[in-house]
């Protein structure tokens, strides 16, 4: 009855370590054991770097296109205003008269008269 028993040692509760604590305790030395565990993380970082570079190049190309279109728009606006001014100048009555004179057309000196059609009843 009097047997020796091992003393009962209370178990320590399992405490979850925070991420920051686990990162601080992480062994960053690369050896054969750690290398295989790091491959997914390295691939993940490389994918983000590739996406970052592609996004930067896409943005630069888009900005270049926008700048080119902005310059083209300015040129087209200038052409529009120029042609609009020329058209309004050419459509003035004095200019039309000058263009019509060589064709044998003359400007009316009397106002136009209205004609009425009278129907005869049978």
Image (cartoon, rainbow, N blue to C red):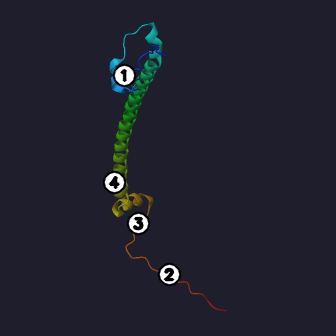
Which residue of the protein is positioned furthest toward the bottom in this rendering?
122
Q: Which mark sits nearer the N-terminus, 1 or 3?
A: 1
The crowding category of the residue bearing disc 1, from other C-alpha atoms within 10 Å (few below 14, some 14 to 19, many at least 20), is: few
The residue at 64%/91% (across/down) is 121
CA distance for labels 4 and 1: 75 Å
- Residue 99: quadrant of the picture: bottom left
Query: Could you say where residue 91 lies in the image, as x and y percent from the top left?
Result: 38, 59
Identify the residue position indicated by label 3 in the image. Answer: 106
- 92 or 84, which is in the foreground? 84
Q: Which mark sits nearer the N-terminus, 2 or 3?
A: 3
Q: Which mark sits nearer the N-terminus, 4 or 2?
A: 4
Secondary structure found at label 3: loop
Q: Which mark sits nearer the N-terminus, 4 or 1?
A: 1
Which residue of the protein is positioned furthest toward the top in this rendering?
32
Say if 103 sits above or below 34 in the image: below
Residue 115 circle label: 2
Query: Could you say where residue 47 lies in the image, as x and y percent from the top left?
Result: 45, 23
CA distance for labels 4 and 2: 37 Å
- 115 or 89, which is in the foreground? 89
Identify the residue position indicated by label 4 in the image. Answer: 85
């Amino acid at each position: 009855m009097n047997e020796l028993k091992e003393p009962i040692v209370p178990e320590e509760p399992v405490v979850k370590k925070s991420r920051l604590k686990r990162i601080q305790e992480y062994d960053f030395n690369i050896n054969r054991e750690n290398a295989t565990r790091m491959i997914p993380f390295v691939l993940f970082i490389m994918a983000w770097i590739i996406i970052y570079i592609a996004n930067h190049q896409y943005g630069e190309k888009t900005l270049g296109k926008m700048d080119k279109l902005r310059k083209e728009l300015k040129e087209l606006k200038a052409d529009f205003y120029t042609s609009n001014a020329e058209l309004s100048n050419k459509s003035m009555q004095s200019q039309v008269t000058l263009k019509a004179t060589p064709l044998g057309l003359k400007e009316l000196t009397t106002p136009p008269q209205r004609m009425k059609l009278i129907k005869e009843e049978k």
